[in-house]
Amino acid sequence: MAERKRVRDEAHEHVRVAVIGSGFGGIGAAVRLRREGVTDFVVLERADAVGGTWRDNSYPGCACDVPSHLYSFSFAPNPDWPRTFSGQEHIWDYLERVADTFRLRPHIRLDTEVRGARWNGERLLWELETSQGRLTADVVVSATGPLSDPKTPDIPGLDTFPGKVFHSARWDHDYDLRGKRVAMIGTGASAIQIVPEIQRDVRRLTLFQRTPPWVMPRADRDITGAERWLHRQLPFTTQLRRGLLWGIRELQVQAFTKRPNELGLIESIAKRNMARAIKDPELRAKLTPTYRIGCKRILLSNSYYPALAQPHVDVVASGLAEVRGSTVVAADGTEAEVDAIVFGTGFHVTDMPIADRVVGDEGRTLMETWKDGMKALRGATAAGFPNFLTVIGPNTGLGNSSMILMIESQLNYLADYLRQLDVLGGRAALAARPSAVGAWNRRVQERMKRTVWNTGGCTSWYLDANGVNTTVWPGTTTEFRAATRSVDLNEYEVLRPPAARPADRGGRKLEVSA
Ligand code: NAP
């Protein structure tokens, strides 16, 4: 290994494409590259296995709240999904199998963390510094995902807590919660899956709820043997099922993006879901949101409210503000003595951590470039970062459908990007024009104005520190698919190495950078 590392260091291994991350985005990119005939690529993964967020989140009850037949790659349908909403272990296993089926293993470098990536404008390539040595790449595809780095709030006194502390995305399976007094912080998608699972075991559960979520019933069931048999025998039935699931969500999104006032009907279904389990009017008042449904992610659960109705579960309708020894203190002054604190407080989404490690053509990091908000042309390319594409980049998130649809659209864009470079011939790079990035972003933000995420009366992680929605796509997945079908070269400047300027080296007519 040491020998291999040294050779790599000395030789500065070069690849056509370096993909960062091996979650759905990175594995999808790898499959797409192979299908496009690109074999000169690596997938750099900091952990010791593929799977991304589905590898890291192993908390009790972890499952996807998008139906499995939609939450899978269109090019790798799985007739054997066990449940309508499959659990984490099945989704992780699916990704492992995709890596095998599409023969990705030789490309995947595990335990290889990207520490830095710097654009070399003379040689038109990216220089990557990894925990296993250096390499260079013509094109970098950043597929680190928005849910990769857990966020734990800076709580005064947390360091004085004598008990156990962990984040939902770093579950400590060696710690036995049975018989313990536990504080659960947060009421997002993760927390509401955790609460019903752990309340059965713990002595006392204190839930710190800063903002109540809207929780809808979850139509979760086993997929029967007959259904699976049918999907295996007649593969088009899997496609049909997927199409139906997609179509329903595609219609729903119109209400989210254009007619938030029509969401009242959905609110009444969520209220009935709560009323069925929560009989105590005081608790019901605490749990009832005061913002429009959909403004924050709508959560799905049949077991969350029944868990909160248990006598050994307390809901504190206030955020965790302080820790004093083994006492956790809410912003409203409520105190509880606990043995363990579990943070279900989400991820660094609007401040994409990899951005701090990527240095573009002017020597600035992507983080600095994005200090006033993340912006990327068609969710993929940022001005000043040639040949650098982000999968699940700015404004590509969805409020109500499968992110795999968006990922596959971005992979179409990547495939065409590489084709365009091929057509150009010779050493070349594409640099997103600031004017094109600006125009795209203005269009996105204009459409965002009337969406439920901006008008629904809540604060959410969809919005960045400046209150700008830099995460969600304000349209249908069909619209995004159309917008990313191909690369419009008018939106890019074609760069050539200095030695090649000003002569055109063949291919179509080129623009030469200054
Ligand atoms: P999240 O949605 O960001 O939720 C974080 C929670 O922590 C919020 O309820 C937030 O309250 C709360 N919080 C933060 N600081 C707090 C404090 N000091 N005291 C009390 N509460 C505090 O994080 P998440 O639940 O991990 O979910 C992140 C994303 O992961 C989801 O939106 C979803 O995209 C994905 N996810 C998906 C699934 C799935 O089934 N597909 C499952 C889990 C997660 P506020 O609301 O007041 O900010």
Image (cartoon, helix red, strand yellow):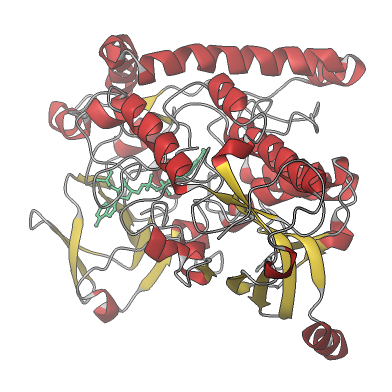
In-front residue for pair 186/253: 253
Q: Is residue 407 left or right of residue 109?
A: left
Q: Is residue 273 left or right of residue 178?
A: left
Residue at (48, 61) in percent of width and height: 149
Q: Position of residue 364 (x, y in %)?
A: 44, 69
- Is residue 23 shown above or below 321? above
Q: Quadrant of the C terminus?
A: bottom right
Q: Is residue 391 visible?
A: no
Q: Most extreme residue toward the left, as rendered?
A: 333
Residue at (32, 24) in percent of width and height: 451
- Is residue 233 shown above or below 119? above
Residue at (53, 27) in percent of width and height: 401
Q: Position of residue 507 (x, y in %)?
A: 81, 44
Q: Position of residue 264 (x, y in %)?
A: 27, 12
Residue at (62, 30) in percent of width and height: 405
- Is residue 246 shown above or below 165? above
Q: Position of residue 331 (x, y in %)?
A: 12, 56
Snapshot quadrant of residue 152 = bottom left
Snapshot quadrant of residue 226 = top right
In-front residue for pair 506/388: 506
Q: Is residue 373 visible?
A: yes
Q: Quadrant of the N terminus?
A: bottom right
